[in-house]
Amino acid sequence: MKKYLILQHPGHNRVYYNLSGQLALSELEIATRRLDADCSDSKIDELEKVRYLSFTTEEDITDHDLEILSRLSFVFAIFRLEQREDQTCLIPISKVDYEYVDNKVSSLMKYAGKTNELFTKMMINVGLLSSDFDYNHKIQLLDPVAGRGTTLFEGVVYGFDVTGIEIEPKSVHETTVFFKKYMEAERFKHTSGQRQVSGQKKSEAIYMQEFEYARTKEEFKSDQLRKKLGVVTGNSQEAANYFKKNSFHLIIGDLPYGIAHGNKGAAKSSSITRNPSELLSLCLPQWHQVLKKGGVVVVAWNSFVVSRQKLSEIFTDNGFEVFTEAPYDGFEHLVDRSIKRDIVVARKK
Ligand SMILES: C[S@@+](CC[C@H](N)C(=O)[O-])C[C@H]1O[C@@H](n2cnc3c(N)ncnc32)[C@H](O)[C@@H]1O
């Protein structure tokens, strides 16, 4: 038997770190199902008063396993535990260097209502590891409630093609201005433009701000290696008018919380304060169309406002298969006095 210990990322937020042991364990358990090695006994462990996540395997983990483990949102360092005479030794294992764009891209912008980056990364991992796809596919990711782009930027770190829909033009503007500056500062080869994605008359036109980019000129020339980021200034309830059927492998989003974040512009918008179940009922038929078979939706919402049961029913009514068993029920956590956050994970059959 082999035992592995994972030191958890201290994160950017102490509150999130303290609460996130259980979330990390749930993410780890979902990941271990996709590993080559036969895993058992995943748990929160303690060694010399330091918290780790641990698991045991029959044989050594493979390179493929390390590809998955290195990407988990909470992973700071991975060790193999060895007992040498009367000493417990932690042997460090090199993580896989998987970032297409440096992870700072999703943490540079600071604003009220921003979704925690590590939590966002966790939603992407849980979605992908629960889908029929893996990190080697040319993943197309949609955030249908994109805000100022945390999910899009976490997807960019993975080298996915990412698309957002956001109803607030100001947020779309800030996201695209930031990304353009980032591309310039980091010397990525890129082009940007605007494309109409819906609307017959000029007054009904809906546009997507689009980027194509790559690390080098050579990569940019290749259709396989060139990456895309796009943001539609529009309403997620119209998603099927903006994109072709079966376009996306993943739909990942942090739904409006049913409370305002001290931002006057945002507080005025009725869509921000709308109950998440109402928004989902209107959006899911459209999201179902644009998601590929075997693709997965992960949404975070405020479970003080609507129950898990209610939200799961809306997914089931719209033809999705909801993951209800453990560890999928292990993600609920308190963010502040008015927000208890949870996620629902649902697959298109
Ligand atoms: C919780 S915020 C997402 C924050 C985002 N993850 C970030 O870190 O920037 C939810 C977003 O959904 C947007 N929204 C609400 N209703 C929408 C709709 N019908 N279509 C598109 N976006 C919508 C809001 O304007 C808000 O920006």
Image: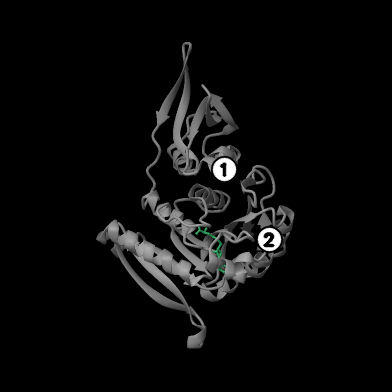
Q: Residue at x 39, y 46 (%)?
A: 98
Left or right: where does residue 256 sit relative to residue 13? right
Front residue of 106 and 334: 334
Residue 78, image x, y percentages: 45, 33
Front residue of 200 and 340: 340
Q: Hey, what amino acid is under mark 2?
A: Phe
Mark 2 — residue? 315
Q: Residue furthest bottom?
A: 201
CA gap, disc 2 to disc 1?
21 Å
**Residue 83 in view, yes or no:** yes
Q: How is the image coloured?
A: one colour
Q: Residue at x 68, y 61 (%)?
A: 315
Q: Residue at x 42, y 51 (%)?
A: 107
What element does badge 2 sit on? helix
Quarter for ligand 1? Answer: bottom right
Q: Of the two numbered discs 2 and 1 on the same chain, state the one appearing first in sequence.
A: 1
What element does badge 1 sit on? helix
Residue 187, image x, y percentages: 27, 58
Q: Residue at x 71, y 60 (%)?
A: 316
Choose top left, top right, bottom left or bottom right for residue 319: bottom right
Mark 1 — residue? 27
User: Pointers 2 and 1 in contact (CB under 8 A)?
Assistant: no
Q: Hey, what amino acid is under mark 1?
A: Glu
**Quadrant of the image containing the C terminus:** bottom right
Residue 52, image x, y percentages: 52, 31
Front residue of 89 and 321: 89
Crowding at dot 2, Cα within 10 Å, few <14 / some 14-19 / many 20+, comes out as many
